[in-house]
Image (cartoon, helix red, strand yellow):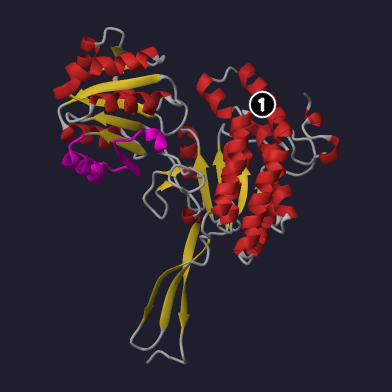
Amino acid sequence: MTPDTIFPASRKRPVATADAVPPGEDVAAMVRDLGRKARTAAATLATLPAETRRAGLRAAAATVRDRAGPIADANTQDMAAARTKGLTAAMLDRLELTPKRIEAMARGLEDIAALPDPVGRILARWEQPNGLRFERVSVPLGVIGVIYESRPNVTADAGGLCVKAGNAAILRGGSESFHSSAAIVDALRDGFAGAGVPADAVQRIPTTDRAAVGALLRLHDHVDVIVPRGGRSLIERVMEEARVPVFAHLDGLCHVYLHASADPDMARAIALNAKMRRTGICGAAETLLVDRAIAERLLPPVLDDLIAAGCAIRGDTTVCALEPRATPATEDDWSTEYLDAILSVRVVDGLDAAIDHINRYGSHHTDSIVAADRDAAERFLRDVDSAIVLHNASTQFADGGEFGFGAEIGISTGKMHARGPVGVEQLTGFNYRVRGTGQVRPA
């Protein structure tokens, strides 16, 4: 399959190539042009009726379904290149678009369309003694730059969420998903345009040149916020270079803690699912903590399940004594996001020690306690300083779709404005609308 056959003749599109910057035009100028188009589209989106944006999302979903074949062909091209480059199994899993995942993208767009409109909500209303009436009203953020790696389905999620919230999006996917993302963006743009939503509501940066990331991060006059989604090196670069606000998404260093009161069957099921359902996602557990009071009784069957599923165990001295197939953990293991079938396991002396470990080594992403003791669970939920904290549930629920958000751009581990799954509500800000009857402020 060649790039020329990614789209059938009836829907021929410009061929996506990794160096698709027009001759004689530098990367910074190209990104600035995208910014100008996005700013124009954002101004139009902010005034569109909610039903028009909803119709655009439904049309985009229909177009994604209609082009499932070309999208899959483009993904096949990316997968072949990724295998040649020697990408890990976890990275290949993130990159692959199966028919089920393409359908999930379309369904996700429909789910986003069905959400309540986040724009124009009255968040608060009050009146002052002088008769001035105040409202705090949700409004779009404007133009959102989304920088992400590997997972091409983020293209549809990000574009859909931004448009639902009345924002324009500039997308910069990873080089490994270049052709897949191009095919998805073309489907979104054509679907939007056919329903009266500006095609430039979603644009992608058509080059793998890393200079494009730097240009986007400096585009403060056209971009209102940056949402990065990827590994530590990407996040660190964004945090260092950005001249616009950033919704930070650091490592998914997630923990599961098996409290002394944990139901054994529940503990086994949650530990296995949290690690092994999908090892390459940010909600996958990377460390298992087990209360010393139950370690000798519960840890062997839990580790049996994990090892049988293909997971390598790196444990402390107690773990290694209980499980000879485990290898000794190093200090670095407690702060490593494996994104693979590897799990660090530590035995801890009770709830306080578990909370201390998580707050010291974790990335403030997602952490879970398995406990029948409700008081212990409530303390864990209160004292663990993470964006998502769960009781008796797998960390793999760290997903905007599972929260009822339709989808997400990422999981924000920061504490300003957006925390946890970044969905449509987190992609709005607010302004104050003040109504008077001729009031003037006394001197």
Label 1 crowd (10 A; few <14 / some 14-19 / many >=20): many
Pinpoint residue 402: horizontal percent, then vertical percent: 44, 42
Which quarter of the picture shows residue 253?
A: top left
Q: Nearer the viewer, residue 269 or 197?
A: 269
Magenta span includes 377 = yes
At horizontal 68% and vertical 61% (from top left) the residue drawn is: 40
Which quarter of the picture shows residue 348?
A: top left
Magenta span includes 199 = no
Pinpoint residue 66: horizontal percent, then vertical percent: 73, 39
At horizontal 54% and vertical 28% (from top left) the residue drawn is: 94
Pinpoint residue 143: horizontal percent, then vertical percent: 59, 55
Q: Is residue 382 visible to the viewer in this orientation of the structure?
A: yes
In the picture of the structure, the residue carrying the numbered disc 1 is 78
* Mark 1, secondary structure of its residue: helix
Instruction: Tell me the magenta residue range.
Output: 372-397
Q: Nearer the viewer, residue 38 or 156?
A: 156
Q: Is residue 213 visible to the viewer in this orientation of the structure?
A: no
Side (left or right) of 189 relative to 383: right
At horizontal 58% and vertical 37% (from top left) the residue drawn is: 104
Side (left or right) of 92 relative to 349: right
**Residue type beneath disc 1:** Asp
Q: Nearer the viewer, residue 169 or 218?
A: 169
Q: In the image, is residue 351 above or below residue 385?
A: above
Quadrant that contains the C terminus: bottom left
Which quarter of the picture shows residue 140?
A: bottom right
